[in-house]
Amino acid sequence: MLSSSTEMITVKNISKYYERKIALSSLSFSINKGELVALIGPSGAGKTTLLNTLATIVKPDEGFLTITGIPFEKLTNRKLLAKKIGIIRQQFDLVGQLSVIHNVLAGRLADWGLFKSLLSLLLPQEKEAALKALERVGLSDKKLEQTAKLSGGEQQRVALARLLLQKPEIILADEPVASLDPARAEDILSMLTTLVKEENQTLVTSLHSVEYARKYFTRIIAIKNGQVFFDLPVHEVSDSLLAHLYQLKEQSDHDES
Ligand SMILES: Nc1ncnc2c1ncn2[C@@H]1O[C@H](COP(=O)(O)OP(=O)(O)O)[C@@H](O)[C@H]1O
Ligand SMILES: [Mg+2]
């Protein structure tokens, strides 16, 4: 059955304040299954806060949010959450001392009891699935290496393999390629978006580079001053809109709203 119009993320008028600062200001949008959404916008626009809200790490002060139809307040179960949401960070979140394959197997941790998790460090379970995931990201030959010894690009591939095991419905990534050189960055983005399409997942990624957003994503949500500045299919994003997005704030905007 085609499910291309299933709403995976619904955000209605969410706001988040830090002291007197407004990080998110009455944001609304919805994201359907299979969409590849790039979040762009100047530094401090609210991209990280928004992604952390979608990941249920940050609680909005106002508004409401559902993930696969489940309201924010109900998304407290770690196991359930891991089935819904996978996260990729700039800093990879890998355990450097552990071997590559153990880091990949950690993608299953939320599914296992603590005992099994610890046991897996000695006797890898679901090793087959982990090996297959490593093969898909082109790291079969590095499976037993210490993760810390891998390059940044390779470590990000390990993070992708771990997501392949976790199999979340939604993947959230905050500047996943910010610490990589351009060739490595394109390699990871191309791999990430290909895997997401193959697995029929939904992807929301913040990016510094508009060029990458245009090349690999289907939709761009631009954030400025905690608000949606534009939300368009990638082919409708014009250079003049982008120029406006990154334009420095006028003096008259200062401290308003
Ligand atoms: N934990 C925090 N405490 C106080 N202010 C914060 C915190 N996190 C973010 N902010 C502020 O919220 C705004 C949005 O930040 P952020 O979401 O990190 O933007 P972006 O990721 O687009 O650069 C910024 O003004 C930032 O200074
Ligand atoms: Mg950020």
Image (cartoon, rainbow, N blue to C red):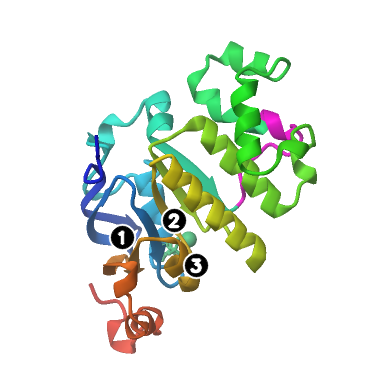
Q: Give the spatial CA distance, label 3 vs label 1.
A: 24 Å
89 relative to 210, above or below: above
* Residue 199 % position (x, y): 43, 39
* Residue 183 % position (x, y): 65, 65
Q: Which residues are magenta?
A: 91-102
Q: Amino acid at mark 1?
A: Leu
10 Å crowding of disc 1: few (<14), some (14-19), many (20+):
many
In the image, taking residue 4 as reference, residue 124 lies left or right, namely right
**Helix, strand or loop under label 3:** helix
Q: Amino acid at mark 2?
A: Thr
Residue 212 numbered tag:
3
Q: Nearer the viewer, mark 3 or mark 2?
A: 3
**Seen from this angle, which residue lies furthest bottom?**
251
Q: Is residue 38 magenta?
A: no
Most foreground residue, 215 or 50? 215
Is residue 61 shown to the viewer in this render?
yes
**Image quarter for ligand 1:** bottom left
Disc 1 residue: CB within 8 Å of ligand 1: yes
* Residue 29 % position (x, y): 23, 56
Residue at 24% from the left image edge and 39% from the top image edge: 2
Residue at 26% from the left image edge and 34% from the top image edge: 73
Residue 205 numbered tag:
2
Residue 229: image quadrant is bottom left
The kind of secondary structure the magenta stretch mainly shows is loop
126 relative to 201, above or below: above
Residue at 41% from the left image edge and 80% from the top image edge: 246
Say whether disc 1 or disc 2 marks the residue closer to the N-terminus: 1
In the image, taking residue 57 as reference, residue 91 lies left or right, namely right
119 relative to 130, above or below: above
Q: Nearer the viewer, mark 1 or mark 2?
A: 2
